[in-house]
Amino acid sequence: MRGIVIPHFRRTSRHPDLDPDPDLDLDLDLDLDLDPDLDLDLHLDYDAAMRVPPSLRHSLPLLLPIVTLIPAWAACGSSDSNGGTVTGDGGPVQDASLSPGSDGSSAQDGGAHDAGLARCPRTLGPLDGERRVLVSHPFDKDGNKAKLFELLTLSAGGQLTRPGVTFEMGVALESDIAFTPDGAVALVAQDDGTIGVVRFDSAGPHVVHAAYKGSFYAARVIMDPRGDRAYVVDSNTAANKGGIYAVDIACDGSLTDRGLFLAASGPSAMTLLSSGMDAIIATNDMTGAGTTNDTLTANLAGPTNTGMGMSFPEGGAITSDIAVMPDGKFALVADNGVVVGSRVAMVQLPGLISRGILSLPNPAAVVASPFDNAALVFSSDGVDGIRLLRYTADAAAPFSVVSEIAYVHGKPELPSFTATITRGGLKGLVLVAENAAVRGLALHDDAGVTDAFKVTFGAGTENVVGVIGAQP
């Protein structure tokens, strides 16, 4: 039977009224109706005039007692709300290919989706051309959580525009949006542990799963390079079936839950290496590894564990993000927690050898330059800023902090989620989701960076930008 625990929270949270004062009263209410249906509601309430400090929000599992229930229905099972309404210049568009409803697929056998649905490998689209960019708008005009997504267009010349196309899935404000290689399907982890799935074609976006419920509680989704599978990070403890799960992606975007893929305790971040078949994962404790490891590598073909190490020898890390350099020799692991926090580990691969710690304030995200000579660190939580690191693999100190970048379009506000173009004429363009804007940063082959543009979404809580993803 599956236990339910309070999951790890991403450190960064957005709310339109930005008060950097970290003093905030939090009420955690667990309403348990222990009737045969067992209705479990977890409410995190906060004053609408202030945002939850990201440091506190991400670290709640360390500050609160773990709550474990063991209802039989929590062990596995899958259901979703399919279909959705899309709005834009042409009016509402209803996806008729997938009717609304729910399924009862099993994590052990793939369930109902297996019938007639095969995995669908996908090839990369053209090097240059128009790309789809997707952002979430996780609040409505009154500051309540919202399920809105907006489709943007990125031209081959690097111009980001808003054609006015929106649709609804679930609330998304904690994890980057993952696209298949051809840009035809996008997946995102939502704040209720479900996965939102949308398919794109010439007619526009079609919601495949507004809220796909698998045998996992999704914290992040990482796309397999083939595009026919995605990996789901469940930040639960190992005893409560936390770890890395796999879902297969059919040609129409429908998901099949393949169950637990790799057991781990409290995984908080995962990134694929350049091979596409190997991954680096930040975890509280890899199953069987004791308490001295906070990072592991795995080969996904098995899957098999290929290494374990300690990115932060002092312990206490709550990893917010991982970036692997294109040469595969080093990774940057960001700790954005309240136990220690404000540090980025330089980790040598493949042996997971810690090569030192960079002291950087509240690192919410890290990005490796596709030119393999630099990286960006995005600080949030009241010390918002973007810093450039220089990378030299064979140096005694492989990474050095150059400076905070030169802002052409003003200081950033909560720069926490990113999407990077790694190929074609726009190679090195980093799209940054800010509080009510998307910023474009251009990384260069000389290890420099330019603050290229900023698209603002206007005043009002409904214009807050949550998370972002872009077609590769």
Image (cartoon, rainbow, N blue to C red):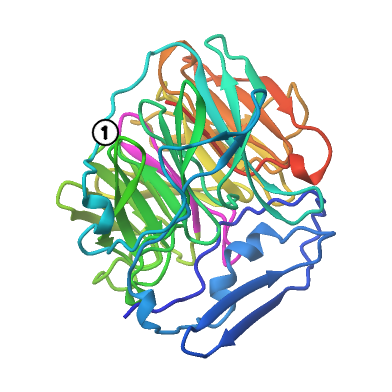
Q: Secondary structure at mark 1?
A: loop
Residue 258 at least partly seen: no
Question: Is 138 drawn above or below residue 290 in the view shown?
Answer: above
Residue most toward the left? 302
Q: Does 282 appear in magenta?
A: no
> Is the residue 143 above or below the residue 159 in the image?
below
| Quadrant, the N terminus | bottom left
- In depth, the one of 193 and 454 nearer the eye is 193
Classify residue 326 as left or right of residue 80.
left
* Residue at 76%, 33% in the rendered image: 411
Residue that appears at 38% across and 44% down? 222
Count of numbered circles in the view: 1
Q: Nearer the viewer, residue 78 or 128?
A: 78
Decide: few, some or many residues near mark 1? Use Cα within 10 Å; few <14, some 14-19, many ≥20. Answer: some
Badge 1 amino acid: Arg
Q: Which residues are magenta?
A: 319-342
Q: Residue at x 43, y 24 (%)?
A: 373
